[in-house]
Image (cartoon, grey):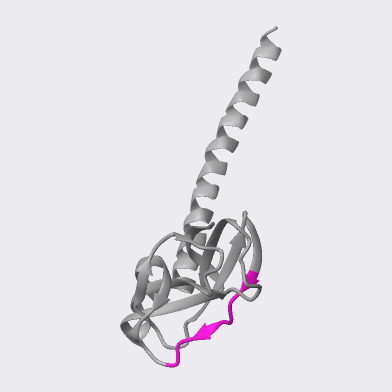
Amino acid sequence: MEQVTKFKMAALLLAALLFMTGCSLIDTNIGDFQDDNQGITSGAEFGRVVMAEGIGSGNRPVDVTDVFDSSQDYIYVVLEADYIEAGTTMFARWYREGQPFEDSSQLTADRDYQDTYVEFHLENLGGRMQEGTYSVEIFVNGNPVVEQEFEVR
């Protein structure tokens, strides 16, 4: 009986040690990944991200909304960029009902930018867009940084 108790105690201590070590390793790795991603996406700092029916001078959003008519010619996502570093790449991935269906062309900043707007758009090529729930996800240097939802009715 005493031998079984010692075995249970040893197993319990081993399990506790593995748990504590495992948590420490996991937390360290997550921190490392967050630090790595921060370096990858640090080429841009964004403010507001909005959906719009149009764009004006300097890509400023016009008629901000998150509901679009299915006959809309273009749907815009506009990012207010506080800073974009030269060489930073960006693209938009468009989703319908949670499924990706189109990636925009990738943009590469040819110089440093401050206080500007970046736009990506979805063009209605068929006369009427399929109604439903949509979203657009913005990628910076290949990493997702923000997602915006909208509806087409």
- The foreground one among 113 and 20 is 113
The answer to whether 139 appears left or right of 51 in the picture is: right
Considering every residue shown, the one lying at the far bottom of the view is 110
Indicate whether 77 appears above or below 108: above
| Residue range (magenta) | 102-110
**The C terminus, quarter of image:** bottom right
The answer to whether 143 appears left or right of 39 in the picture is: right
Number of on-image labels: 0
Residue located at (53% from left, 64% from top): 136
**Is residue 134 visible in this depiction of the protein?**
yes
Q: Position of residue 79 (x, y in %)?
A: 39, 72
- The foreground one among 67 and 141 is 67
Q: In which quarter of the image is residue 48?
A: bottom left
Indicate whether 19 appears above or below 126: above
Considering every residue shown, the one lying at the far top of the view is 1
Is 6 inside the magenta-drawn segment? no
Residue located at (60% from left, 57% from top): 131
**The N terminus, quarter of image:** top right
Residue located at (61% from left, 67% from top): 128
- The foreground one among 6 and 52 is 52
Q: Where is residue 111 in the image (x, y as percent from the top left)?
A: 40, 92
Q: Position of residue 135 (x, y in %)?
A: 54, 60
Q: In which quarter of the image is residue 59?
A: bottom left
Indicate whether 1 appears above or below 130: above
**Is residue 140 visible in this depiction of the protein?**
no
Residue located at (45% from left, 92% from top): 110
- The foreground one among 152 and 76 is 152
Q: Position of residue 127 (x, y in %)?
A: 62, 72
The answer to whether 60 appears left or right of 70 in the picture is: left
